[in-house]
Amino acid sequence: MNSNLISSVMSSPFDNTEHKMVLAQMAFEADEQGLCYAVIEKLGPVCGLSLTKTFKIIEELKESGCLDFQHHANKVVFKLNAARITEKKAH
């Protein structure tokens, strides 16, 4: 759990509560470097979202600069950008 990221997400105004929910869950699962190894198929249900909606939100968060992701072997690693989360509303 990365408490600094959680604090950044929770104190930032978001136009879309689903975006905030996904980022908050990712921050909860992130390490101190802001890396999150969440499984997308499990992330959606935790946030009350369908898999399709979860993928769409992750893509929108990437476009807004709040997170980035890389593929490593058979895993996806998300990197949350705390500065961008606090700096600007995400969708």
Image (cartoon, rainbow, N blue to C red):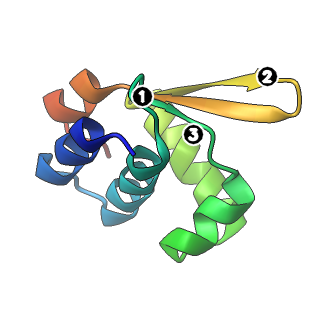
Reading the chain from its start, which is encountered first: label 2 or label 3?
3
Secondary structure beneath label 1: loop
Whether residue 33 is situated above or below residue 57 in the rendered picture: above
Front in this rendered view, residue 31 or 56: 31
Q: Going by the picture, which residue comes out furthest to the right?
A: 74
Residue linked to disc 1? 34
Q: What residue is shown at x 11% (from left), y 49% (from top)?
A: 11
Reading the chain from its start, which is encountered first: label 3 or label 1?
1
In x, y percent, where is residue 18? 40, 63
Q: Badge 1 local density, few (<14 within 10 Å), some, or many (20+)?
A: many
Task: Specify the label residue 72 is tagged with.
Answer: 2
Q: Are marks 3 and 1 in contact (CB under 8 Å)?
A: no
Secondary structure beneath label 3: helix
Task: Specify the label residue 50 is tagged with.
Answer: none
Which residue type does callout 2 highlight?
A: His
Q: What residue is shown at x 68% (from left), y 53% (from top)?
A: 40
Residue linked to disc 3? 59
Distance between the alpha carbons at the discs numbered 2 and 3? 18 Å
Which residue type does callout 1 highlight?
A: Gly
